[in-house]
Amino acid sequence: MTRRQLMTGLLATAIASIIFLLPFIFIFVTATKSSQEASLLNFSLPGGWHLWDNFIKVLQARNYMLLLAYLNSTIITVCAVAIMVLCGAMIGYLLQRRSSRWNKIIYAMVMVGLIVPPAVVPTIWVLQGIGLFKTIHGMILIQVAYGLPFSVLMYRNFVAAIPQDLDEAAIIDGAKPLQVFFKVILPLLKPATVTLIVVKSIAVFNDFTHPLYYLPGRENVTVQLTLYNFQSQFETQYNLLFMNILLVTIPPLIVFIFFNRQIVAGMTAGAVKG
Amino acid sequence: MRKPKSAYPYWFVLPGAVIFTVLFLAPTVASFWFAFTRWDLYSAQFIGLDNFVQFFKEPFLVQGLWNTLIYAFLTSGTKSIFGLLLAVLLTSGIWAQGFLRTVVFFPVLVSTIGIGITFAALMHPTKGLINVGLDQIGIAGPGWLTSASLALYSIAFVDLWKGVGLATLIYIAGLSAISPDYYEAARIDGATRLQQFWRVTVPLVRPATVTVLTLSLIGGLRSFDLIWAMTKGGPGFSSDVLASVVYKQYQSGFYGLSTAGNVILFVLIAIIIVPMTYLFSRREVHQ
């Protein structure tokens, strides 16, 4: 490393800390203050340490709404991502292995799904028609529908790297199509699956717009919706609002620490080849 | 012997296809009917182009359309420029490079609503950290979110702050695909660093540029949550975009009008993104 690289690095670190880290430090500092101190919105260190106090207060707010929200968000995220993985892998596998005139249609649908914004009110109309409006199941399936195109595209590319000889060997040994898929293909797709789980879990967990539309009502509240609800309720209690933000930021942070590499792979998948 | 084809039965597509068709495709197709109706979710009455006429007659709805375009092009343009510059900086072997990549990228993963609330506090006209800081050096900061002419741009800035990490990541992947030979050849020919950037880096990183522009344009045209968390489209209607108009009309019970807004957004995205991908993929063939 040259002297110049060291100096540039030091300068960049200083600037990046101000621009990118300061807002997070602000969240943390505000979450530890008393409500009078927090309402000043300034950047001073807290006079008294209220981290635990605020934590308990946020949890208890509105009859333990945040706990319920964590439960709901977890259920939605886990189920939606699991279905996305399975359906996406099956479609991607078929798309890569079997060429037919349907393939073009499926690709077109994948592109449509990636680009087109969902038509919200007609979706509510459909959900009402099949009795899934304002239900967790409905929300899970909605997330699957919106996340599936990415999942298909990603699995298709990864299946291409698995030699077809492997399927054929299994077929000659008498494996049924489902056995070939579950016993041969899916285990080999593990790197893609891990990446997909990580990237899509964060996306579903952080989703605000779709629960806002399709999941109104207190008992179905999700983590992002609590933030939105608390925003008006805690207008004068910034310490509790920012404690909530802090709590919502922690899950992605943990995932990021452990799965940094997979996230980078997922986010740039197909980006360079176009 | 059994035909090899049967190892890949079509029904593998079925579970995903059903979910996608019922919950995404069907509503999208239906929106082209409901946009032409007066609709209360139970009965729809065909009223022709009335919704669209109303949409383009109401000044605040038209402003929402313009705001959408300004917001989308501003955020995707700036993300692309800053993303490339950051990527060049963070691949040049400087000190703490890995740490810096992490710091720049992390906001991408954080809840948009959380970021929106945080920056709304930082941009508070009198107490906010930004204006207090500006005050220290003798500048009277404007009302970032309370001024009608500024609110949209302030939100666009936060969008840039949150999204530039993804652009940087894509550009880093793109830069690492450029062979060092090009730079060596350019150096031997006596190209300065600036010339290398313009003549080697920028043309050869084009696939990444296309990806960044396309992704952030699609995201920008559809964006809703950050705007909703920071200003709810206000003050007045000055930072409303199509997606927030769709939500407001839905809340007020104008389902037909809301769906018309959705159709306009659909058409807008189609006429921007489709020619763009066509143009870019064609030019690449000619290279």
Image (cartoon, coloured by chain):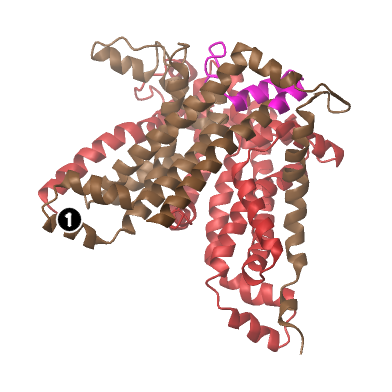
> In the picture provided, is A195 more to the left or to the right than B40?
left
Q: Residue at x 44, y 58 (%)?
A: A273
Q: Is residue A123 above or below residue B56?
A: below
Q: Which chain does tag 1 point to?
A: B
The kind of secondary structure element at disc 1 is: helix
Please tell me whether residue B20 belongs to the stretch shown in magenta.
Answer: no
Q: Which residue is rendered at x = 57% and y = 23% of the image?
A: B65
In the image, residue A198 lies at what x, y percent? 54, 53
Q: Is residue A35 left or right of residue A89?
A: left
Image position of B108 with respect to B255: above or below:
below
The residue to which callout 1 is attached is: B186
Segment colored magenta = B231-260
> In the rendering, what colour is chain A?
red
Mark yes or no: residue A26 visible: yes
Q: Colour of chain B?
A: brown
Q: Position of residue B213 (x, y in %)?
A: 44, 41
- Mark 1 packing: few (<14 Cα in 10 Å), some, or many (20+)? some
